Amino acid sequence: MQAAQAKPKLLDQLRDVLRTRHYSIRTERAYTDWVRRFIGYHRMRHPGVMGPSEVGQFLTHLAVKKNVAASTQTLARNRGRGQQNLAVGRGRRGLP
């Protein structure tokens, strides 16, 4: 009898998609870092239970408290959408 294989963790799924699409390792690290920050900001809540309002809260936090540049916020927003799509089972279509 074989043990059931666990579904890969969210960040592992994200890495798999990025590697399949031949993103550079630096891009992969940047995207996974932003996803980690987003999850950490929301006290480790799973992205599948969060929506656009949580993404907005995170971006506001970056702009107001962290003084992050607009281009960096755009990167974070795009990664937030991609990881949310993975979290709710929309798969690879969630990434550019």
Image (cartoon, rainbow, N blue to C red):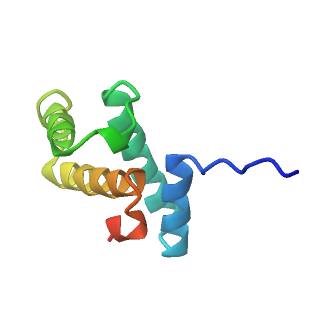
Residue 31 x, y percent position in the rendering: 40, 53
In percent of the image, x 19 and y 55: which residue is there?
74
User: Left or right: 59 with respect to 9?
Assistant: left
Residue 66 x, y percent position in the rendering: 20, 31
Which residue of the protein is positioned furthest toward the bottom in this rendering? Answer: 21
Q: Please tell me whether residue 28 is drawn above or below residue 32 in the rendered image.
A: below
In percent of the image, x 44 and y 61: which residue is there?
27
Which residue of the protein is positioned furthest toward the right in this rendering? Answer: 1
Task: Locate residue 68: give its quadrant.
Answer: top left
Residue situated in front as seen by the camera: 39 or 87: 87
In percent of the image, x 27 and y 49: which residue is there?
76
User: Left or right: 93 with respect to 50?
Assistant: right
Q: Please tell me whether residue 26 is drawn above or below residue 58 in the rendered image.
A: below
User: Left or right: 52 with respect to 25?
Assistant: left
Residue 20 x, y percent position in the rendering: 54, 73
Report the label total: 0
In percent of the image, x 13 and y 50: which residue is there?
70
